[in-house]
Image: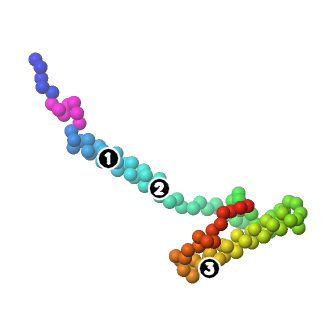
Amino acid sequence: ELRALRPGLLFASPEAAASRRNVLLSGALAAAAVAAAPADPVVAAEFPLLGKVRGPFEVDPKEAIIVGDINSADSKAAKAMINQYLNRVEEARAALDKDEQADITSLLKPLAI
């Protein structure tokens, strides 16, 4: 004897497929929201006798070691270039302090160090 199969036995009903899709989408959206959320900055614990622990690229200018002749032409040119960049940054900052929407593109030059 042959029985007629009900459609629900072979395929998922549209309502069930929609509810599964909604569950999957809500889980994916929640995971994306957690991944995209900004992380709090990590601060290393300060030890009582060690003081502030600096990162690998933080250097105190007073502890900098200069290799080579400080009065050489290359050294003087490098210092002049750094001072030019510093002046541009100060000009840009002053312009933005005066007007937050100021156009500072003329102050932006490629970094050529």
Identity of the amino acid at label 2?
Ala
- The CA span between labels 2 and 1 is 20 Å
Chain-order first, disc 3 or disc 2: 2
Residue 50 visible in the snapshot: no
Q: Are marks 3 and 2 in contact (CB under 8 Å)?
A: no
- State which region is magenta: 6-12
Secondary-structure class at tag 1: helix
- Label 3 sits on a secondary structure element that is helix
Q: Residue 11 carries which label?
A: none
- 54 or 64: nearer the viewer: 64
* Other-residue count near label 2 (Cα within 10 Å), few / some / many at <14 / 14–19 / ≥20: few
> Magenta stretch containing residue 30, yes or no?
no
Q: Where is residue 67 in the image (x, y as percent from the top left)?
A: 86, 60
Q: Is the residue 69 above or below the residue 24 in the image?
A: below
Answer left or right for 89 relative to 17. Answer: right
The residue that mark 1 highlights is: 23
Marks 2 & 1, CB-CB < 8 Å contact: no
State whether residue 107 is above or below residue 4: below
Q: Name the residue under label 2.
A: 36
Q: Distance between the residues labelled 1 and 3?
A: 52 Å
Image height of 96 relative to 8, above or below:
below
Residue 11 included in the magenta stretch of the image: yes
User: Would you identify the image quadrant in which residue 86 lies?
Assistant: bottom right
Task: Point out the residue furthest to the top here.
Answer: 1
Image coloring type: rainbow
Mark 1 / mark 3, whichever is N-terminal: 1
Residue 94, numbered label = 3
Under mark 1, the amino acid is: Val
Determine the residue positioned at 61% across, 71% down: 106
Q: Which quadrant does the N terminus fall into?
A: top left
Q: Disc 3 versus disc 2: distance between alpha carbons?
A: 34 Å
